[in-house]
Image: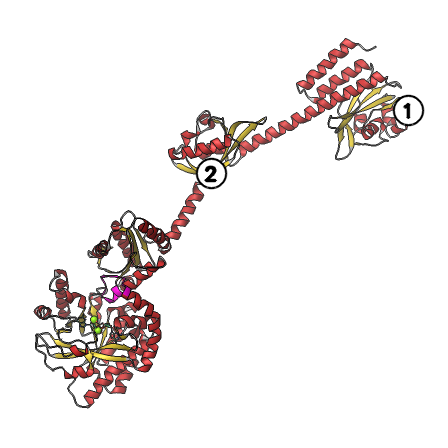
Amino acid sequence: MTDEPALLAAQNAVHDLIARQAPLAQTLEAISHCIGIVHPGAVVAFMCFDPARCSLSMFPSEHFSASYFDRLQEVPVGSLGACFGAAAYLRRQVITEDIETDPRWEAFRAAALGEGFRACWSSPVITAEGELLGIFGTYFRQPAAPSETGKLRLRQAAALIALAAVRDRDSRRHRTLAESHRSLFVNHPDGVYEFDLEGRFQRCNAALERIIGYPERELIGHHFNEYVEPDARAFIQAAFDAAKAGDSRQYEARVIHADGHAHQLEITNFPVTSEGEIVGVYGICRDITRERNQEAQIAYQASHDLLTGLPNRAALDDRLEQDLEWARQNRRLLAVLHLDLDGFKAINDGLGYRLGNLLLAAVAERLHPLLGPRDTLARFTGDEFAFLMPALGCREEVAAAAERILATFEPSFEIEGRALHISTSIGVACSDEPVQQVHELLQHADLALDVAKQQGRNTWQWHRSKGARVVSEHVLLRHDLHAALRDGQFELYYQPVVEAVTGRIRSVEALIRWHHPVHGVVSPGVFIPIAEQTGQIIPLGRWVLCQACRSLAERVARGEHVCPVAVNISSLQFRRDGFLEEVQGILDETGLPPELLELEMTESILMGGAEQAIEMICTLRGMRISVAIDDFGTGFSSLSYLRDLPIHKIKLDRAFIQDILTSRRNAAIVQGIITMAHHMDLVVVAEGIETPAQQQELVRRGCDMLQGFHFSRPVPLTALMALPDLLPARPCPDPTAAADHQ
Ligand code: C2E
Ligand code: MG
Ligand code: MG
C-alpha cells in the first residue's frame, strides 16, 4: 500500500520546487522520490530527447554506473530501442516486465542486467503542446508490471516532469536573452538609455556617458530637458510624447555636453513595453557633430570662394532668385552690380599672384562694410565681384550705391608695405527693367560692365534698353562684320590733333566708321570689342592700317603737304605673332615713309608680358615708327613701365578732360601726368577738348597737343583736306557740321 501522506508531502515538495524554478536536477530528484513512495524499490532515470539527432540521452544520475550512463547516450528513437526508445517512438508508456525476455532490449539487455535490473517501465514526457521532451524510465531489480493506478501515477509524474522541464527551459532562455540584452545595452557603440514616463533617466550605457560627458549616476533621476538647448525642448518633448503613445521617432537635436559645447545628436525614441504596457521610453543616440560639420564645410566650400570667404558665383545664382522674389513682394528694387577691377591682370602679372591674391582679399574686405542686411557680395572668378542689393527704393539709391563702391577704391590698398592703386568698372542692372528670367539681370549687368569699361573705366554704367538692342544685335553684327569687310562698308575718318598753343594741325588720328546697310553708322565702341572677341579685329586692323598708309602715301606721292597719321592698334593685334612684319609689309607696299606713321595703343598691351611689349616697341622705334599710349590714366597706372617704354607720346583720356574745370581731383591728376611725362620727354595730348575753356585750361597746364570736337570732329579724308592748315586757338568753325557722323 502506498503511504499516501508521505506521497502527498513529496508531491507538494515537487510543486514547490517547480513553482520556485529550482534547478531541474533537484526537481527530478524529488519526482524520483515520489515514484519511490508509490513503487518501493524503483530506480528512476530521465532521458532527454534531442530532436536534431532524434535520439535520447540519459540525464546524469548517481543511481547508475558510469558505463550504463555512457551506454545510454544518443540512443536512437525507435521500436527496438528498448522500452525507452519505443516509448519515445510510440509517444506512450511502454512496459517491459522482464528485460531478459523482452526482444526490444536486445541491444541493451547485457548492460541492464549487468546493472542488476530486470524490469523497466518507460513513460514519454510530452508538453501540453505535444512536444516530446524525453522519457523517464522506472527500473526494478525483479520482473514487475504496474497496476492501472501505478500507470496513472507514472503518467502524472511524466506531466510534472514536462512542466518542470519547460519551466527550466523557459527560464534558461529568459536568462540568456536577458544577458544578451544586457551585453547589447552595455556594449552598444551608440548611446542607449531609458526614461521613465516622466522623461527622467533610469539607466544608460557607457557610450551615452561618453557622448554627453556625464556618468550614469549623475544622470539618473534627471529630466532630459536639463541637457538640451532651450529652443529644442518643445520639439524633443513632442518626440518623447509620441514614443510614450507607442510611436517611434527619429530626429536630430543639439545637446549640451558636460564640457559646455553643443553636440549634434541623431536620436531615436521608442516605447519600453512590459506585459503589453508602455512603462517608459528608450533612447538611442549617435553623435553626428563631426559629420554635420564636414557636410557644412563641404557646403561652404561649394558655395564660397576660399580666397576671400565671399559667396561664389553658384551661391549668388541661388540668391538671385530669392532676392528678386523678395524685392517684388516688398515692392523694392533689386540691383545687380557687376564689378571688374581695372587693370588687375597687370598687377597680377607684374607683381605676382601672391600679391594679386592679397589685393583681391583686401578688396573683398573693403567692400564688405558696404553690405546692407539683405545684400550679398560674391566673388566670381578672377577679379570680378558682384553685389545683389534687393532692398533699394529707387534708381537714385542704386546710383548712390554704385558711387559708394567707386569711392571705396579711392584710397590706395596697402599690401605688404606697398601702396597699390586700383579702380573698378561697374555694370548695373535693375529689377525694374523687363526680364523674362532672373539670370538675365546678371547678363544685363555684365553688358553694362562692358560699356563702363569702354567708357574709360573707374566708372559705372546702367544697363540700358538701347544696350539691349545692341546685344540682341550682337550676334547679327558678328555676321555682318564679315560681310562688311568684303563689301567695303568701312571708311576711315580723321580727326586732327593740334598744337595746344597755336592750334596748328600737327597730326591726324584715323578712326574707323562702319556704314551698316541697316543700322546706319555703327560706333567703333560697339563693334571693335565684338571684333576683338571674334578675332575679326586682325583683318579689320590690317585694313585700317593699309587704308591709312595708302591714303597718306598717295598724297605724299602727289607732293602735297601732309602730317603724320595715327592708327589705333588693338592689343590683340599687337600681341599676335607677325605684327611687326605686317606693319613693315604695309609700309613697303604703300611706300609711306615710316616717320609719318604713329601707332596708338592702350596700356593693355602690357598685360601679355611687359618685357615683350617693351622689346616690340623698341623694334618699332628702330623702324622709325612712333608709338603713343592711348587712353592714358584709365588703366593700371603703370608709371614704372612708362619709364622703360620707348614711346614718344601719351594721350590723356577724355574722362579726365571732361570735368577738368570742375573736378580738382582730375585737374590734379592731369597736372601730375603732364609734369611727369615732360620729365620723361614725352609729348602729352589731351583728348576730348570740346570747349575753349578746356583748351585754355590745358594750355595753362602745359599740355602739348589737343584733340577734340572743339577743333574738329572726325571727318572723311576729303573734308579733312578742306580744313585750314592753321586753326585759330579759339573758337573754331566746325566744317563738318553737315556731315556729322558722330
Ligand atoms: P580713341 O582712340 O580714344 O579715340 C578717340 C575717341 O574719342 C573717338 O571715338 C573720337 O571720335 C572721340 N572724340 C574725339 N574728340 C572728342 C570730343 O571732343 N568729345 C567726345 N565726346 N568724343 C571725342 P570713336 O571714333 O567713337 O572711337 C572710339 C574708340 O574706338 C577709339 O578710342 C578707339 O579706341 C577705337 N577705335 C576707333 N577706330 C579704331 C581702329 O581703327 N582700330 C582700333 N583698334 N580701334 C579703333
Ligand atoms: Mg586713339
Ligand atoms: Mg583715346
The magenta region covers: 450-465
Tag 2 or tag 1, which sits nearer the N-term? 1
Q: Which residue is mark 2?
A: 251
Q: Is residue 573 above or below residue 560?
A: above
Q: Residue at x 30, y 67 (%)?
A: 469
Quadrant location, ligand no. 3: bottom left
Q: Is residue 475 above or below residue 71?
A: below
In the displayed structure, does residue 368 sit left or right of residue 88?
left
Q: Which residue is mark 1?
A: 100
Q: Residue at x 47, y 31 (%)?
A: 241
Q: Is ligand 1 within 8 Å of the beta carbon of the residue shown at mark 1?
A: no
- Cβ atoms at labels 1 and 2 below 8 Å apart: no
Name which quarter of the figure residue 669 lies in: bottom left
- Considering every residue shown, the one lying at the far right of the view is 101
In this view, the residue in front, 671 or 615, is 671
| Color theme of the render | secondary structure
In the displayed structure, does residue 206 sit left or right of residue 615?
right
**In the rendered image, which quarter contains the N terminus?**
top right
